Amino acid sequence: MDKKVYNSIKDIDLSKYEYLLFDLDGTLTDSSEGIVNSVIYALDKVGIKENDRGKLLNFIGPPLQASFEKYYGFTPEEARDVIVYYRECYEKKGMFENKLYDGIEDTLKFFKDNGKKIMLATSKAEEYAYMILEHFNIRQYFDYVAGASLEIKRTAKKDVIIYGCEKFNETSLETAISKSIMIGDTIFDIEGAKACGMDSIGVLYGFGDMEEFKDAAYIAENP
């Protein structure tokens, strides 16, 4: 793919965008330990012993429901039951088995100081997203937070993006989208933005790779 790769997000000219939408897992934080541990716990609860932690990295990015159905063959009803077990572990400790990427807070501060409106747009449950932002003391950089619903009615990244953009004080959803750019580390962020007609930035320091970013407007190696 012949596309310029910028050293950092801050090196990209984002002057035409008013709203910056950041993904959470793999973009702001390395959440792999807590997510993998919570998936292992949930699978164990239904009698499945999973020792391949690398395989479970596939759970970072897409909605949990889709991942449990895809990788373990659960029906939608079974997947919802397993998610209840996942949350048992995740709420107690999994969400805090997590670390902020080096340079992310500086990046958020840089854009905030330069007048950008910043939104978190994540397929993680919105309640958890708020708790994680507070845990890492970066909540103050975000004007808006948009996440999935605990009832699993809003999980796809496209739906999260639309839900978030509806919070902007704009004349229409189309106007809000035209002023926004999605920043994320997997194909789900890029495809979600594309489905909304929004530009995107793929970041290489998370859990995705260059091949996933063919539809991204920009690519950055570092925060």
Image (cartoon, rainbow, N blue to C red):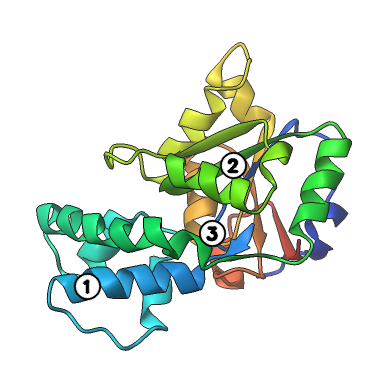
Residue 107 placement (x, y as % from top left): 80, 52
Marks 2 and 1, Cα distance to the nearest angstrom? Answer: 29 Å
Are dots 1 and 3 in contact, CB under 8 Å?
no
The residue tagged 1 is: 43
Instruction: From the viewer's perspective, tell me whether residue 74 is left or right of residue 122.
Output: left
Compared with 165, 147 (above or below) is below
The amino acid pointed to by label 2 is Leu
Are dots 2 and 1 in contact, CB under 8 Å?
no
**Label 2 packing within 10 angstroms: few (<14), some (14-19), many (20+):** many
Q: Earlier in the sequence, mark 1 or mark 3?
A: 3
Looking at the rendered image, the quarter that the N terminus falls into is bottom right
Instruction: From the viewer's perspective, tell me whether residue 12 is left or right of residue 69.
Output: right
**Label 1 packing within 10 angstroms: few (<14), some (14-19), many (20+):** some
**Label 3 packing within 10 angstroms: few (<14), some (14-19), many (20+):** many
Task: Tell me the mark number nearer the camera, choosing from 2 and 1.
Answer: 1
What secondary structure is found at the residue carrying circle 3?
loop
Are dots 3 and 2 in contact, CB under 8 Å?
no
The residue tagged 3 is: 25
Compared with 158, 60 (above or below) is below
Residue 144 placement (x, y as % from top left): 61, 31
Q: Is residue 58 in view?
A: no
